[in-house]
Image (cartoon, rainbow, N blue to C red):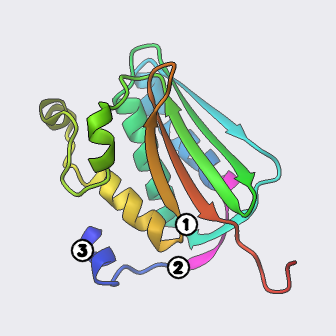
Amino acid sequence: TLSQLDYGKMDMEMSPIPVKLIVQNIASAMLIEARGQGLTLETKLEEPLPLILADRNRMEQVIANIVSNAIKYNRPGGTVTLSAFSQEDKVVIKVQDTGIGIPQEDIPRLFERFYRVDKARSREAGGTGLGLAIVRETAEKFGGTVTAANRPQGGARFTVQFPRYQWEGEP
């Protein structure tokens, strides 16, 4: 995936897509995994949510990767919250968890290729250190950004922002 992104060889079918549908699909798909880990998966969707211009499958991959990590690195009995809302000319998607958080010194390198916070734990969980690099590079292809931070009450928060789709003639 990263090689295809690097060389512009990734087939993308760009179209206006409803963020609400993407979030609902990911929540449904990840619910069994979350429950299997003893976690609660919540969704919070602002109404109405604008469209974004993206490839639907790649967009789902971006959000699913972040939610999967939130499930994988959470605590038993924890919660993963997937929310989406509009903010000015952006659509914001947040994935928050009640997990172990991210060591502060690792946050600046989190989206680098092959970077893993805890090498031993990542190996146990099957991590390659490529997932978040794919997330960042794919989001950037859609004109978006992704950031990570620790939550003051514990856990991590990933924020992905995309430009709101505006069709021709829209004010």
Q: CA distance from mark 2 to mark 3?
A: 18 Å
The residue where tag 2 is placed is 13
Numbered circle sitting on residue 155: none
Q: Residue at x 27, y 36 (%)?
A: 105
Asked whether disc 1 touches disc 3, contact meaning CB atoms under 8 Å apart, the reply is no
Mark 3 packing: few (<14 Cα in 10 Å), some, or many (20+)?
A: few
Q: Residues within 10 Å of mark 1 (few under 14, many from 20)?
A: many
In three-dimensional space, the C-alpha distance between marks 1 and 2, rounded to whole angstroms, equals 8 Å
Instruction: Give whichever of discs 1 and 3 has the lower sequence position.
Output: 3
Is label 3 in a helix, a strand or a loop?
helix
Q: Which residues, given as a range, are shown in magenta?
A: 14-21
Residue placed most toward the observer, 124 or 152? 152
Report the disc number at residue 56: 1
Residue under the image location 69 percent in, 36 percent down: 44
Q: Amino acid at mark 3?
A: Ser
Query: Disc 1 vs disc 2: Cβ atoms closer than 8 Å?
Result: yes
Residue 116, image x, y percentages: 20, 43
